[in-house]
Amino acid sequence: MDFKVRIFDGFWNRYRRLVKQTMIPYQWDVLNDRADISIERERNDASIPNEKSHAMENFRIAAGRAQGKHYGWVFQDSDVYKWLEAVSYSLCYEWDDELKETADSVFDLISEAQEEDGYLNTYFSIMNPSGKYRRLVESHELYCAGHFIEAAAAYHQATGSSKALGTAIKLADHICRTFGTGEGQIRGVDGHEEIEIGLMRLYHLTGKREYMDKAAFFLKERGKDPGFFERQIREDGGDPVLTGLLSFPLKYFQVHRPVTEQDTAEGHAVRLVYMSTALADLAATSGDEALAETCRKIWSNIAGRRMYITGGIGSTVTGEAFTLDYDLPNDTMYCETCASIGLMFFARQMLRIESKAEYADVMERALYNTVIAGMALDGRHFFYVNPLEAVPGKSLNDPGKSHVKAVRPQWLGCACCPPNLARLIASLDRYIYTVKDDEVLVNLFIGSELKIEDGRRSLSIRQDSDYPKNPVITFDVENRAEPVAVKIRIPSWTDRYTLSVDGKETEADAEYGYVRADVSAGKHTISFELEIIPKRWYSNPKVSENIGKTAVTYGPFVYCAEGVDNGEDLHLLELPAHSFLDLKWDDELLGGVGVIEAEGIRLQEAEEDDGLYLSEGPRKAPRKIKLIPYYAWANRGVNEMRVWINEA
Amino acid sequence: MDFKVRIFDGFWNRYRRLVKQTMIPYQWDVLNDRADISIERERNDASIPNEKSHAMENFRIAAGRAQGKHYGWVFQDSDVYKWLEAVSYSLCYEWDDELKETADSVFDLISEAQEEDGYLNTYFSIMNPSGKYRRLVESHELYCAGHFIEAAAAYHQATGSSKALGTAIKLADHICRTFGTGEGQIRGVDGHEEIEIGLMRLYHLTGKREYMDKAAFFLKERGKDPGFFERQIREDGGDPVLTGLLSFPLKYFQVHRPVTEQDTAEGHAVRLVYMSTALADLAATSGDEALAETCRKIWSNIAGRRMYITGGIGSTVTGEAFTLDYDLPNDTMYCETCASIGLMFFARQMLRIESKAEYADVMERALYNTVIAGMALDGRHFFYVNPLEAVPGKSLNDPGKSHVKAVRPQWLGCACCPPNLARLIASLDRYIYTVKDDEVLVNLFIGSELKIEDGRRSLSIRQDSDYPKNPVITFDVENRAEPVAVKIRIPSWTDRYTLSVDGKETEADAEYGYVRADVSAGKHTISFELEIIPKRWYSNPKVSENIGKTAVTYGPFVYCAEGVDNGEDLHLLELPAHSFLDLKWDDELLGGVGVIEAEGIRLQEAEEDDGLYLSEGPRKAPRKIKLIPYYAWANRGVNEMRVWINEA
C-alpha cells in the first residue's frame, strides 16, 4: 500500500523540529562521548554503567579502527541503531546532506564491525567471541539485531541506501540460518523481544517470506521450553554479561507459558509490548485469528486493568514490570518512556487487525502524556520513569523511590529511552492514519496531509487542526478515483461531536468508536467538531490508590499539579467535585499550554509540636489550584508533582 | 537497687504461659532442626538461607562434637542466645528443672565452642578462623557476643549459673583486650550494635568498670572513622560473609557521623534502636548529659516524625530502614518486630534518664500493637514485617511487597524476631515499673506485684487491673519505711482520669505525664480511673499517605479491619466521622478481644466492562464496619487488613 503523510501541525512540528535540530545532534555528541554532560544512573544500583556512552567507540573497536574494550551495557549498540532510525525518519521531513553523510559513515562503520558470516554485536565481537548466542537470556544479541534491521530498513526507505539494507539482510540471513528447529540450529529465543519486529519489517520491505516465518518461529517458540534460558547458561558456564537477569521469574521474559496461552500482560513491560507488537503485526499480516485473539486478550488486560491514566505501564521498578490487575501505585511505579512508546507500536498494529478506536484512544493517551513527558521541552533531558506523583525528598531518601526522579537527567546509564523517543516523534506520521484496502482510519488529530496512490485509489486528505485548542477539525478530501470510506475516531473521553460533509450534518452511527464518512470522487470538506472541555476522571474503584481522588483532563492531555504553582505538600490540596475547571491558554508558559484553574482547598498543617497522631483532622482553607498538562511537568526546577488529586 | 516484679495479669499471663509452654519448646525444636515446619524467606531474595536452622548444630561442630560446615546467616548463633535469654526469664516466673538442665547443657556446649582465648563465634571458628574481626561491617561477631552476654547474665540472675557467667566474662575480657585505642588493639566497631548493650549489662551485674568503659568506647567510636569498614574489607581481601552489606550507605550502620552528632534516626531500624538503648543506658548510668541530649534528639525524631501509630518503625524494606520525616507508607514499610522490641528497650532506658511519660507511652504503643502482632495466637507463627495494610494478591504479585506477608510463617530464614519476642514477653516484668532513688514510676497497667527492699525502702505495690477492659486500676501499697512517691502514667490518649488515695480524690497535677501520689508508711489504696473509649485518630497532615483516613484505638490497642469481617477490597470502606464506635467484648473471638462496630459505607464496584477510568466516582451503600485489635490480625487465614480507613 503506497501512502505518504506530511505533518504541518503546530504542536507536533515543534517536537519534530526539536528532534531534527536538537535531539539528533545532541545524541550524536553523547554517543561519541563529546557532550559535556553528567550521565545519571536510573536508580540506586551501583552496577549501572554511567561513566560514558562509548556506543560509537564500541563500533570503532569492533571494526578494528580503534583499540580497547567494550564499555556499557551489553545492548549499548541499540542506542546507535535507534539514533540511526530517528535520523532516517527525520530525513523524510527535513533533508540534510551533512546528516545523511554522517549516517552513511555510521552504516559503513557498522558494516565493518559486522563479522564475515553476518554476525553483528560489538560486545561479543570484542569481549567474548566464543560466547555468541550462548547466553540468550541476557545477551540482547537478537534484540540489538532487531533494532539494526529496523534502522536499516528505515534508512533504506528514506535514502535508498543499499549499504544499510545489505548489512541488515546479511545479519537477518545469518540469524535465519542460526535459529530454528532444524538440525544444528538453535531452538531458542532472545530474553528481550525485538528481533521479531525487525524481521517483520524486513519482510514488509523485501517481501521475502523467510523473514516473516522466522519472526513467527521466534514468537511461537516463546514459552514452549521454559527451561531453555537456564540450560543454555549452564551449558555455557561463562560469566554473566548482565548480572542478575536469570534470577527474574520466567514471566519477566514472557516465557512462563506458550505465547498463545498468555492472556495477561506479564513481566518486563517493554518486552511485553515489543512482543505484542510483533505478534499483532504477524496476526494482521498473516490473518492468523488465533494470534489476533491472543493480542486482544493481552491488549484488554493492559488497557482495562494495568494502564495508568497517562498511558504509562509497568507498576513496579523490580523488573520494570507489570504486577497484577488494578495495581497502579502512583509513586513507586515504573511507567518507562520506552514502554509507552511500545504501547503505541502495539496499538498501531492492532488497528491493522481491526478498526476499533479503543486502540487509537490508548495510542493518543500514551503519546500526549507519558511519551512526550519522557523529554524536557529543551530536548536535552530525559525521563526513564514517568511517575504520577513525585516528591523530591522521598526520591532522595526513600530507596524504594530512587528511580522516581524529580527532574530529567541529561542522559541515563541505560539510555534506551532518549533515542526511542527521537525515532517515535520523527515517525509520528505513521500513526495518524491507518490505510486499509477498504477504508482510511483517522486515528489522531494532527494537522497533516495524507496522499494515497495505489492501483485503485488516488486520494489526498488534508487535515487542518489546532487540536485540542480548537474543537473543529477540517478534512479537505480530494478523491480522484472510486468512493472511499473515511472513518474518524471519536475520542473515548467524549460522546458529543458533530460530523458534517460538505456543510451538511450527518448522523452516521459510530462503528467501534469511528464515525464514517463515505467520500465519492471529487473534492469534499469534512468538518468534525468535538466537545472538548476540562473533565474530571475517577479510577475504577478496584484501584485502591485512587479512592477519593480525581484526575483532570482536557482533550487528550492529562493534567497535574506542580509544587511551583501550588506550594509543596500537594497531598494537602483538595479539588472539590463542584468546583469549576477554568481553562485558559497561556502561550508563554512551557512552550504554550492550556492552564486549568479551580477554586480548591488546602488542608492546614499541624502546629510544630502537635505530634504525629492527632485527635482531630486538619482544618481547611480555600486555595486556588492550578494545573498544567502532565507532559510539561518538571520543566521549572525541582518540585513536587501529582496527577491524582484528593477530592473534597 | 533491689526490686522484684511478679505478673498475674490475665492478658499477659496468657502470653507468658505461651512463651514457657509453647514458644520455648517449639523454638528449641526448630533450633535443633527437628520441627516439621517450612521456613520462609522473609522476602523474595534467593540468598536468604531457608533450608533449616542448623543453629545448634553449628555449635556442635564448633565444639568438635560433630563434623560439618556452618549453615545459615553469619549471625545464626544469636538465635540460640536469645532463646537462652528467654529461657532464663521464664525460669523466674515458672521454674522447670528439665528446662534448666537443657539450658545448662547448651551453656556447656557453648563453652566448649568458645576458643581458648575467649573468642566465640561458630561461623568464624568453623569456616574462616583467619578472618576473625577482620570484616566487622558484616561479621556480626560483636553483635552475637552482645547477645551471648545478655543471655548469660540473665541466666546467672535466674539460676546462679557460674558456668554461663564465666563464659561471658571470658568473652567480654577477650573483646576488651582486642578492641580499643591502645597499641595493637582494633579501633573499630561492629556493623550491628548489640555488644554495647551486653557490656553495659555485664557492668550492671559485675560492677566491673571496664565493661562500661568498653561500651562507651564502642558507642563513641561509632562514626568517627567512616572509612573503617571499607578499609578493613579491603585489607582482609577475603570473600564476603554477608554479601551486599558494604553497598549500603554509611547511615545504614549509624556510622555516617559521630554518634553525638546524630540527631535523627537513620539507617537500619533495629541497629538504630539497639545503639540508642546502649547510649541511653550509658547516659543514665554515667550521668553524661551530652549523651542524654543525643538520646532525646533521636527519640523525638522517632516518636514525633518516624513512627507508625502501631509503634512500628522502619519505613522501607531496603535496608530495613528509616527514610525521612513523615514518610510512613502503610503497605511497603518494614516495621520489623525486632525494631519495636528495640524501641521498648530504648524507652525503658530513657525512663531511667528522666521521668517522662512520653517514653512509656511509646513503650505501651509498641508492646500492645506491633510487638505482639509479631506472633500468632498459637505462639508458633511469626511476622518479621508488620504492615498497616496488607492485600494478599499484592504481596504475591508486586515484588515491592514480597516482604509484606499476609499470614505468619512458621519460621523465617532470618529468625531474629521469634526468640526476640520470647525474651521480651518473658521479661515483661522489667518494663512495668521504673524504680528510682526518689520515686517509683508506674509505666504499664499490668496486674502485678512490685516489691522493693533496699536499705532505705521496704515497699510492696500490688497493681490490680483488667486494663483496658476495666477503666479502674487499683494499687494496694504497703509501705514499711519512709514516704515514697508513686507516679502513675496518664496515657497520652486521654486527659480524663481521677486519682484517689485511700478513697479520697486528689487533684495532683501531672508532671511530664505522670500523676503523683505520695505514700506514707502503712497500708494505702490508690485508685486510678481512666476514661477509656474507642477513639478516632488522624495523622499529622505531613503524612501524605494518611490524608482523609482515620485510625481507631481503644486504650493502648490500635484497631484494624480485616477482610474476613468486612469483605475484601478494604479500601472501599468508609468510616464516617460521626459514626458511633460501639465496643463489645467477645471472649470467644481471637482469645478474647474488644470488637468495635460502626455504621459505615462501602463504595460500590464498577460494572465489569466499565473500564479503568470513569467519569463518575463510585456509588455508596451502607455497610457495617467491624474492627479488631491490630495485634490479633491474620489469625483467621489469608485475608486483607487495613489500619488507616478512609473517612467519608
Image (cartoon, coloured by chain):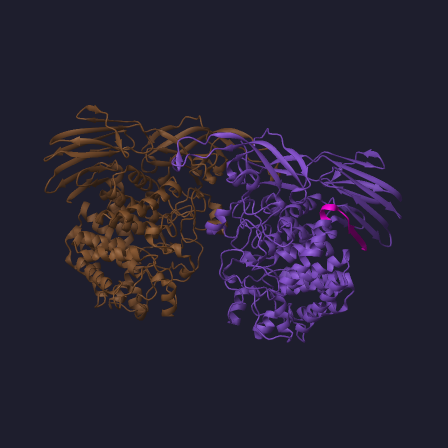
Chain colours: A brown, B purple
When asked about the image quadrant of residue A53, the answer is bottom left
Question: Which part of the image, by quadrant, shows the N terminus of chain B?
Answer: bottom right
Residue at position x 36%, y 56% in the image: A255
Report the front residue among A566 and A507: A507
Residue at position x 19%, y 29% in the image: A526
Q: Going by the image, does A79 lie left or right of B87?
A: left
Report the front residue among A118 and B437: A118
Rendered view: B482 above or below A645: below
Report the front residue among B586 and A569: B586
Provide residue B282's location: percent of width, then percent of height.
70, 57
Provide residue A258's location: percent of width, then percent of height.
34, 55
Provide residue B604's location: percent of width, then percent of height.
47, 33
Q: Is residue A238 visible?
A: no
Provide residue A623's location: percent of width, then percent of height.
47, 29
Q: Going by the image, does B524 lie left or right of A148?
A: right
Residue at position x 73%, y 61% in the image: B154
Q: Looking at this view, name the residue that lies furthest to the top.
A: A504
Rendered view: A310 above or below B67: above
Rendered view: A407 above or below B203: above
Q: Which residues are magenta?
A: B1-12
Q: Is residue A232 visible?
A: yes
Q: Is residue A47 magenta?
A: no
When asked about the image quadrant of residue A242, the answer is bottom left
